[in-house]
Every structure is written in structure tokens, then in C-alpha cells.
Amino acid sequence: MFAWSSVCGDRPAVMGIVNVTPDSFSDGGRFLAPDAAVAHGLALVAAGADVLDIGGESTRPGAQPVAEADELARVVPVVARLAAGAGVPVSIDTRKAAVASAALEVGAAIVNDVTAGADPAMLPVVADAGAGIVLMHMQGDPQSMQNAPAYGDVVVEVGDFLAERVMRACDAGLDQSALCVDPGFGFGKTATHNLSLLTRLAELVTRVDVPVLVGTSRKSFIGSLLGGAPHARDDGTLATVVWAVDRGARIVRVHDAGAATDALRLLDVMASLDAKAVA
Ligand code: PMM
């Protein structure tokens, strides 16, 4: 049985991203060959990643869906090798229950589902395997989600959605300790929506009774503030990582695991000195 407390019980966890895709927005094509993906995963762990998240379908705005057979062929060999050799839990980033099931069979411990269980077979597959899950909020689907995202109050609506999906997962037989939620930065959100979710993250953290994961790495709202191509957004990403963890996020999903690990170590030292100064 996977429990999130095993990776983020004492301190926040860094989830390193391994995109086995030709078209992800910041690193598409770099790790499509299985050897390159495995080497990248091992390098992320050496740099400090506590979990590896392996994906075979880009969910960037406008991305075309990937056929199940193609996604399976991309991710299963990589998941198998990293689950056996990386020494950290492996997560499979997929919205297809069949892909999740195949990845769990070869050793994945977590399913990262950007649709929070839209495939009706997803929650039963995860429950049967005793695996963990990331339930993410997205408005619309990747093909159209950035056309005109609209909310009354984005923080309240995302919180309502995530709370409802937590209940649904528990009803499907998952233990609450296996659940984690993610507001879904960049998934059907304008830059202003993303910034509201970050600035009011503490509201979301208190709203749900499970760990919150934040995936801001290299996202376009950082580029809209600072300029720069996706791979030049790691410095801006770090600011969001430190901000989010200081406001209660327990897992950060990043491309540059080394920088996030260092920043969070420093934050931890400062937080404990601050606590002593207050005491
Ligand atoms: N972002 C991407 C893909 N999967 N999963 C979660 N849970 N949260 C995210 O923010 C998220 C995700 C976007 O693509 P990337 O893999 O290139 O970062």
C-alpha cells in the first residue's frame, strides 16, 4: 500500500519529471529514447528527487491525444527500469486506466492523473493495486483548455472540485493516505488564475485534508511575468516552489530537481531557525 506520508511525511517531496514524449512544452523529444529517459530519471534522483513522474502523453495546450498503444510503448519499459533501479517511488502520468494498470504492473507506485479519474476504470485500477494517486484539476481538455478559461472564484471552484474528487476516490475504495491533490497550474487557467491559486494556496491546503502537489515548473505564467522560453524559467520556478511549500504544499513537481532540493533544504533551515527565534 502506498501512502504519501512515506515521501512527504517529515519534509516536502520533490517529484522529478521524465517526459517520454516528442512534444512536451519544455523538454519534448529530449528523453523519447528509453535509455535517455532512464538516464534522465537516475540523474534526477541523484540530484535529490524523492519521486519520479514518467509521462508518455504531452498535455501542453493544444496537444493532440496519443493512442493507447503508443503511450504504452513509450512508458512501460521506462517505468519498469526506473521502478527496479531508481530507489524512489515511480509515478505514471496518464489519464488512461489501461496505461496506469500496465505501469502499476511493472512497478509504478503512484498514478498522476491530470483528469482526476475521468476514465471510469481509473479509480478502481488504483484502488486494486494499493497505489497512490494525484488528483488534478483541469478546466476543459488540453486541446481547448486555454481558449477562454473562466471562473467565478478560481480558488473556491478548484477547491470544491478537488474536495469532491477526494470523496469520490474514497468511495471507490482508496485510502485517504493514498491521495494527493493538485490545483493544476496552466490547465484551463489564465496567468491571473494561476497567480490567484499560488497567492491563496493556503486556503486550498486547509480546504482539503490530503497533501497538495504544486506543478508550476516552467509554466507559461512564469514566462508571461519574466519573459523567456520554457527552459529559461527555472529561476522563476524556484520562487514559486519556495512560496508554495512555505504555504503548505507538500510535493513540488519540477524539471530541475537539484535546484528545488537545494532551495527546500535552505527553506527548512530558515524555518527551523525562525521557529527557535519565536520560542
Ligand atoms: N503538468 C504537466 C504534466 N503533468 N501533472 C500534475 N499533477 N501537475 C502538473 O502541473 C502537470 C502534470 C505539464 O507538462 P510537463 O510534464 O512538461 O510539466
Image: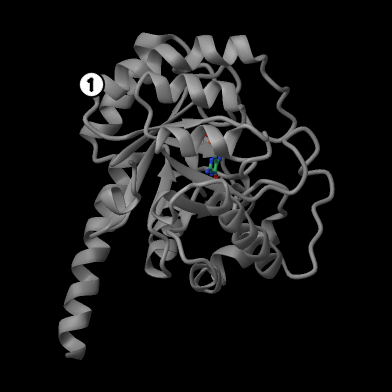
Q: Residue at x 67, y 34 (%)?
A: 119
Tell me: residue 103, above or below residue 95: above
Query: In which quadrant is the N terminus drawn?
Result: top left
Residue 239, placed above or below residue 92: below
In the image, residue 261 sits, relative to residue 109, either above or below, namely below
The residue lying toward the viewer, choosing from 265 and 211, is 211
The residue lying furthest to the bottom in this view is: 279
Name the image quarter holding the C terminus.
Answer: bottom left
* Residue placed most toward the observer, 158 or 22: 158
Badge count: 1
Q: Nearer the viewer, residue 90 or 102?
A: 102
Q: Residue furthest right?
A: 148
In the rendering, at what x and y percent does residue 248 appear? 41, 67
Give how far across and how far down residue 164 sits, in percent: 64, 59
- Residue 245 % position (x, y): 38, 62
Residue type pointed to by label 1? Gly
Mark 1 beta carbon near ligand 1 (under 8 Å): no
In the image, what residue occupies the spot 61% across and 9% down? 69
Q: Residue at x 37, y 13 (%)?
A: 36
Residue 127 x %, y %: 48, 39
- Name the colouring of the figure: one colour
Determine which residue is flagged by label 1.
85
Relative horizontal placement of residue 118, taking residue 228 as reference (left or right): right
Q: Quadrant of residue 58?
A: top right
- From the viewer's perspective, is 1 left or right of 116? left
- Residue 235 visible in the displayed image: no
Residue 249 located left or right of residue 64: left
Q: Classify the position of ligand 1 by quadrant: top left, top right, bottom left or bottom right.
A: top right
Classed neighbour count for the residue bearing mark 1: other residues with Cα under 10 Å, few (<14), some (14–19), many (≥20) = few
SS label for mark 1: helix
Specify the quadrant of the image occupied by residue 41: top left
Residue occupying image coordinates x 81% and y 58%: 150
